[in-house]
């Protein structure tokens, strides 16, 4: 028996409503709770909350004064199509792209890095693809 279950992932932001709208549309979810301080998005695979942080500063990618603490890896069927949709919704392409053709790094509207990959879910596939990038 586990001690805990994942409830959701929470991302800091200066504008939680804008960030939640991005993730809701990009992941095909819906906003289920909204205040000025917190917005919660529900998807068929889990939840993402966005939380207002005073004087929010986006993380830097891949290093710098405010290095990322975590990021999302999103499985997609078509990286180009997913990137186009993310850009339409307000994301931008990260300058640093360390994953070759395996991963594509984008930044959400609040500057959080996230990766698009066509690798099927599961560690053996990820380990196999990672070893070919070296």
Image (spheres, helix red, strand yellow):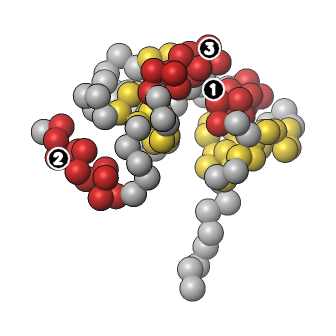
> In the rendered view, does 11 fall on the left or right side of 81?
right
What residue sits right under mark 1 in the picture?
Answer: 55
Measured as percent of width and height from the top left, residue 84 is found at 53, 16
Tell which residue pokes out farthest to the left in this image: 134
Measured as percent of width and height from the top left, residue 92 is found at 50, 16
Q: Where the N terminus falls, by quadrant?
A: bottom right
Measured as percent of width and height from the top left, residue 76 is found at 49, 36
- Of marks 2 and 3, which one's residue comes earlier in the chain? 3
What residue sits right under mark 3 in the picture?
Answer: 88
Residues under labels 2 and 3: Cα distance? 33 Å
What residue sits right under mark 2 in the picture?
Answer: 131
- Of marks 1 and 3, which one's residue comes earlier in the chain? 1
Instruction: Give the camera-side residue of 86 and 128.
Output: 128
Residue under the point 41% across and 48% down: 120
> In the rendered view, does 37 fall on the left or right side of 45?
right
| Vertical side of 131 occupied by 96: above or below | above
Looking at the rendered structure, the number of numbered marks drawn on it comes to 3
Residues under labels 1 and 2: Cα distance? 40 Å
Mark 1, residues whose alpha carbon is within 10 Å: few (<14), some, or many (≥20)?
few
**Are the residues tagged 1 and 2 within 8 Å (C-beta)?**
no
Mark 2, residues whose alpha carbon is within 10 Å: few (<14), some, or many (≥20)?
few
| Vertical side of 119 occupied by 45: above or below | below
Q: Secondary structure at mark 1?
A: loop
Residues under labels 1 and 3: Cα distance? 26 Å
Residue under the point 79% across and 39% down: 30
Residue under the point 73% across and 24% down: 18
Q: Secondary structure at mark 2?
A: helix
Can residue 101 be seen from the camera position used here?
yes
- Quarter of the image holding residue 117? top left
């Amino acid at each position: 028996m586990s001690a805990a279950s994942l409830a959701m992932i929470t991302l800091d932001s200066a504008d939680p409503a804008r960030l939640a709208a991005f993730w809701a549309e990009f992941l095909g979810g819906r906003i289920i709770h909204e205040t000025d301080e917190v917005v919660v998005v529900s998807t068929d695979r889990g939840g993402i909350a966005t939380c207002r942080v005073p004087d929010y500063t986006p993380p830097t990618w891949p290093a710098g004064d405010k290095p990322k603490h975590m990021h999302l890896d999103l499985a997609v069927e078509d990286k180009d199509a997913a990137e186009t949709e993310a850009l339409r919704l307000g994301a931008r392409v990260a300058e640093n792209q360390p994953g070759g053709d395996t991963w594509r790094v984008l930044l959400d509207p609040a500057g959080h890095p996230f990766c698009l990959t066509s690798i099927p879910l599961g560690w053996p596939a990820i380990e196999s693809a990672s070893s070919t990038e070296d």
